[in-house]
């Protein structure tokens, strides 16, 4: 059985303990590979390698850094098929989705930051008898920790700006979906990335993630994952005065006014509800529909949802693949039971699916729930699966109150052709990202992140390059 390896100091190595965790294929429920069960001693090795590599990498010209990163972007693109298959096998997402979204975006992340760093500049402030200029210097060794839902996509979204800004990196992918991070280490070797510049240490959150967070030589932690773990990381990193960027959970509202472009809204709402089995932090899981449109929307949304095919991730006609892991599958099913206990009516879905030949895999029907109060747990807590609730509303003020009623504040979608209303709403919504008449349309230059319990700090474009550099004011009097 394939055992993947850590990538430390330019080499593919076994974990010190020589222990491994099982890696599951969600489409069959079977173990298909092993992932290193690393610990703090592996992190220590990586810190030594990254510390030695740092001065050399930071001193490289921007052009040199950009060239090797562009080579990595090219190699990701050249290996699209292999990477997409690996991502799908590890995560359960349809292969077509990994091919269209995850892997191209991972390549784009490297290409984007390879270019962005060549355009990065700092400010000068002139006084009558002096000039101030700002240096933006690399931080040193930084840590990145990422989740399982968009494995290579989110892994590279952090690594690329950190490397472009001249830092050396210790990266921890999710232990649930580590395969494409391992394949990326092979790509980095082939691209000629100098040893120690990027180190990838596999293992669970408690041992590897925590060791990374608390290591005194790690200057910054960029984390994407649950709010619960984000809180743990903040508790450790804040008293050590590390820079932290936390991208966490969401419970995003999808607000539909009666004057929307109906067909576009319906097509997009199907995607924003169930893409990637609903396991995207930006999915709209609370759907508020203006009363005059409610019954029509309900009927059409149910019909369109029932036409979605849940099946093996390798089938080209599969809309929803498998849920990433058994614990997550159990959690989603228990949340559907909770919704029923809370008085919700399951309009469609609500059950596990057992596709022929893959009966031991973890599949769940896309599920729509109606009749729940805005304040119940189902409408307040993140489920992170193919489960949405629908609720009618009458006024803009009322729906704004509903939308802002959770502890989360990642994204929001508004559907309306009334330009004054959407501008008013966009201003008042408590979220880091507001999509109007679209969803998941991304420009990598824009600030990305959440407010409230969804996040601290912003990723993307210059925000990421600012996070991964320290500004220093130099004041010279004439
Ligand atoms: P998770 O928080 O369980 O794990 C995320 C990462 O943190 C994993 O690599 C894990 O091993 C590590 N980890 C766990 N415990 C740790 C600890 N004590 N110290 C350091 N690291 C630790 O999240 P998940 O289940 O992998 O991902 C799903 C969550 O991620 C959802 O809540 C989702 O909303 C969120 N998410 C947010 C965004 C965003 O951009 N805001 C994007 C994707 C996913």
Image (spheres, helix red, strand yellow):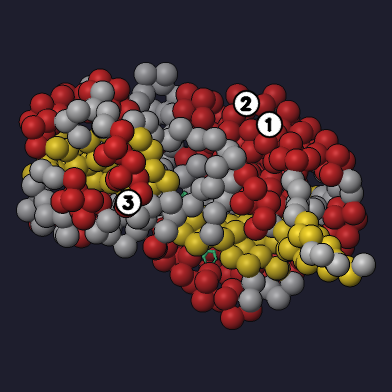
Q: Who comes first in sequence, dot 3 or dot 2?
A: 2
- Relative to the observer, which residue lies in front, 421 or 65? 421
Question: In front: mark 1 or mark 3?
Answer: 3
Q: Position of residue 155 (x, y in %)?
A: 60, 47
Q: Which mark is residue 217?
A: none
Q: What is the tally of numbered marks visible in this picture? A: 3
Label 1 sits on a secondary structure element that is helix
Question: Separation of disc 1 and disc 2 at Cα?
Answer: 6 Å
Q: Which mark is residue 80?
A: 2
Tell me the residue that label 1 is attached to.
76
Residue at figure coordinates x 59%, y 65% from the top left:
244
Residue at figure coordinates x 50%, y 35% from the top left:
442
- Relative to the observer, which residue lies in front, 193 or 44? 193
Residue at figure coordinates x 27%, y 28% from the top left:
417
Q: Who comes first in sequence, dot 1 or dot 3?
A: 1
> Going by the picture, which residue comes out furthest to the bottom?
239
Q: Is mark 3 within 8 Å of ligand 1?
A: no
Tell me the residue that label 3 is attached to.
429
């Amino acid at each position: 059985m394939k055992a993947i390896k850590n990538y430390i100091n330019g080499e593919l190595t076994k974990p010190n303990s020589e222990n491994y965790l099982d890696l599951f294929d969600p489409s069959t429920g079977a173990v298909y590979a092993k992932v290193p069960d690393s610990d703090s001693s592996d992190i220590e090795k990586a810190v030594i390698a990254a510390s030695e590599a740092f001065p050399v990498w930071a001193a490289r010209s921007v052009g040199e850094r950009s060239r090797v990163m562009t080579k990595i972007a090219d190699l990701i693109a050249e290996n699209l098929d292999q990477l997409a298959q690996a991502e799908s096998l590890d995560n359960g997402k349809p292969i077509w989705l990994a091919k269209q979204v995850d892997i191209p975006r991972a390549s784009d992340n490297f290409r984007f930051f390879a270019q962005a760093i060549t355009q990065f500049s700092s400010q000068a402030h002139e006084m009558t008898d002096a000039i101030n200029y700002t240096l933006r210097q690399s931080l040193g060794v930084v840590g990145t920790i990422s989740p399982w839902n968009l494995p290579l996509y989110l892994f590279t979204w952090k690594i690329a700006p950190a490397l472009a800004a001249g830092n050396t990196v210790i990266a921890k992918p999710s232990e649930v979906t580590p395969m494409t991070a391992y394949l990326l280490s092979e790509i980095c070797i082939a691209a000629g990335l100098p040893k120690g510049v990027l180190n990838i240490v596999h293992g669970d959150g408690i041992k590897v993630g925590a060791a990374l967070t608390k290591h005194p030589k790690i200057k910054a932690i960029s984390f994407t994952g649950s709010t619960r773990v984000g809180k743990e990381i903040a508790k450790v990193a804040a008293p050590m005065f590390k820079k932290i960027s936390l991208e966490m959970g969401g419970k995003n509202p999808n607000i539909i006014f009666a004057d929307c472009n109906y067909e576009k809204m319906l097509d997009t709402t199907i995607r924003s509800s169930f893409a990637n089995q609903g396991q995207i932090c930006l999915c709209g899981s609370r759907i508020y529909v203006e009363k005059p449109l409610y019954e029509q929307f309900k009927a059409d949304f149910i019909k369109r949802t029932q036409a979605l095919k849940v099946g093996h991730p390798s089938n080209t006609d599969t809309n929803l693949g498998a849920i990433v892991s058994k614990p997550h599958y159990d959690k989603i099913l228990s949340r559907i039971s909770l919704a029923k206990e809370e008085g919700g009516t399951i309009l469609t879905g609500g059950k596990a699916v057992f596709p022929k030949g893959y009966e031991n895999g973890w599949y769940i029907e896309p599920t729509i729930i109606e009749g729940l109060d805005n304040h119940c747990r189902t409408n307040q807590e993140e489920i992170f699966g193919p489960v949405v609730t629908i609720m009618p509303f009458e006024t803009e003020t009322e729906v704004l109150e509903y939308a802002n009623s959770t502890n989360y504040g990642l994204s929001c979608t508004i559907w309306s052709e009334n330009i004054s209303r959407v501008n008013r709403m966009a201003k008042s919504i408590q979220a880091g990202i507001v999509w109007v008449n679209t969803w998941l349309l991304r420009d990598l230059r824009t600030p990305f992140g959440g407010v409230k319990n969804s996040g601290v700090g912003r990723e993307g474009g210059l925000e990421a390059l600012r996070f991964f550099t320290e500004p220093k004011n130099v004041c010279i009097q004439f």
